[in-house]
Image (cartoon, coloured by chain):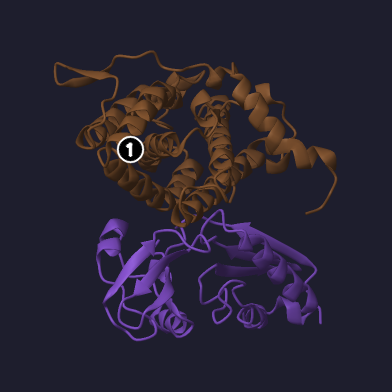
Amino acid sequence: MSAEIPSNLPAEAIRKLLLAFADDELMLGHRDSEWTGHAPILEEDIAFSNIAQDELGHSLVWYTLLEQLTGRSPDSMAFERTWNEFTCCHFVAYPRGDFAYTVVRQYLHDAAEQVRLSSLGQSSYSELKDVAAKLLPEESYHLMHSQGLVERLGDATEESHSRMQAAVDAAFPQALGLFENLDGEENLVSANVFPGNEHLRTKWLEKVVPVLDAASLQAPVEAKNGRIEISCEPDYGGRHRSHTAHLKELVQDLQKVYRMAPSAKW
Amino acid sequence: MAQQTLDEKLIWKELEKIADPEIPVLTLVEMKVIRSVRVQDNQVTVVISPTYVGCPAMDAMKDEIRSRLRDLGCEQINLETTFAPPWSTEMLDETTREKLRSFGIAPPAKHKGDLAATLAAPVPCPFCHSEKTHMESSFGPTLCRQIYYCDTCRQSFDRFKPL
């Protein structure tokens, strides 16, 4: 696979885009893995362990593509950067919370991935298009699973409803951070590399709000002139490396073993 | 030996012996993980396409390919990964599906791109062939499997996830 970016495409902005994808997947994969051995039932333990492994695999694919552009290895990207060098959104780095929060976060993320990866099927950068086509069916299993849990837990019992609603209240503004604008994004849009975060956010809202609604869960949005408008403050900052202390703690944990013996062969 | 390494047929013959580390009744060639082979001067390029990109067995597969080709006398071995087209269970032929079944894994249904539809369709038990089965877990012991249960022979079994 030769990844060289054609000279008519905005190389710097493409690298930023790939980095955001890779960092998001790495952090969410790590958070999901924290359920291994701790999930409320065995099937969910297996599910979240599988999903974690998939997300880490997806971060590896994005880092590998970046390596072909920058020469820096995926291990170096994951284990040798300091926490304030990552460009993941805040959303993926928050602690795992209770299982309701985990389910809602995973669902909001999986729906965003679905929208994002489908849209990349039209990308003018062919490597991006190929990777997206590979990841999309894998991600669709995550979405079927997390959406199924949202639909069942949203109005199952009084407790499940109140926990799920609290999770939506917390996670929804955070999830908007997935769509924070990237530097140079206008160049990506004009070169047809990527349709732009505003466009993806609109598609995502059209997808998730009806599902939450049907599960008796209220998202912080309002319907205005046939459009879904957001009525909360998005949790931005991650794409511009302004992070919360949760990422610092996560990265310490993630890199702990590697930093003990950086030259070890696994 | 050096002359022989230039023979693509010989290389394919060797690659056809490599078993899938998680499903040893199948080879990487049958699994369509190994897509193509190119020989140029002294360099052998093997193009592979990962099943699930997070599959931890991928490294073991690559190591095995390298070691087999080295034993054959190949000196410069290059492994390329391709996602175009992406690996899919649609690529598995009938013989491969039958081998999966005989190993106790229900083969992936043909889906023509509609994964959700295959989850609603009945999955015959690989042991007693009954269609009275149900999904226990949409994820399983490896990234490529789901867990089902047969209500007729009361045996749980893995199903290869359609991808």
Q: Residue at x 72, y 30 (%)?
A: A81
Q: Position of residue B27 (x, y in %)?
A: 57, 78
Q: Is residue A186 visible?
A: yes
Q: Residues within 10 Å of mark 1 (few under 14, many from 20)?
A: some
Q: What is the secondary structure assignment of the residue under circle 1?
A: helix
The subunit carrying tag 1 is A
Name the image quarter holding residue B49. Answer: bottom right
Image mark count: 1
Q: Residue furthest front?
A: A158
Q: Residue furthest left?
A: A225
Provide the residue designation for mark 1.
Answer: A160
Name the image quarter holding residue B117. Answer: bottom left
Q: Position of residue A64 (x, y in %)?
A: 62, 44
Q: Is residue A23 above or below residue A176?
A: below
Q: Is residue A100 left or right of residue B62?
A: left
Q: Position of residue A34 (x, y in %)?
A: 58, 42
Q: Residue at x 38, y 43 (%)?
A: A121
- Nearer to us in this view, A121 or A8: A121
Q: Is residue A77 visible?
A: no
Quadrant into which the C terminus of chain A falls: bottom right
Q: Is residue A25 left or right of residue A266?
A: left
Q: Residue at x 85, y 45 (%)?
A: A263
- Nearer to us in this view, B152 or A246: B152
Name the image quarter holding residue A244. Answer: top right
Rendered shade, chain A:
brown
- Nearer to us in this view, A264 or A192: A264
Q: Which chain is purple?
A: B
Identify residue type, mark 1.
Ser
- Nearer to us in this view, B7 or A78: A78
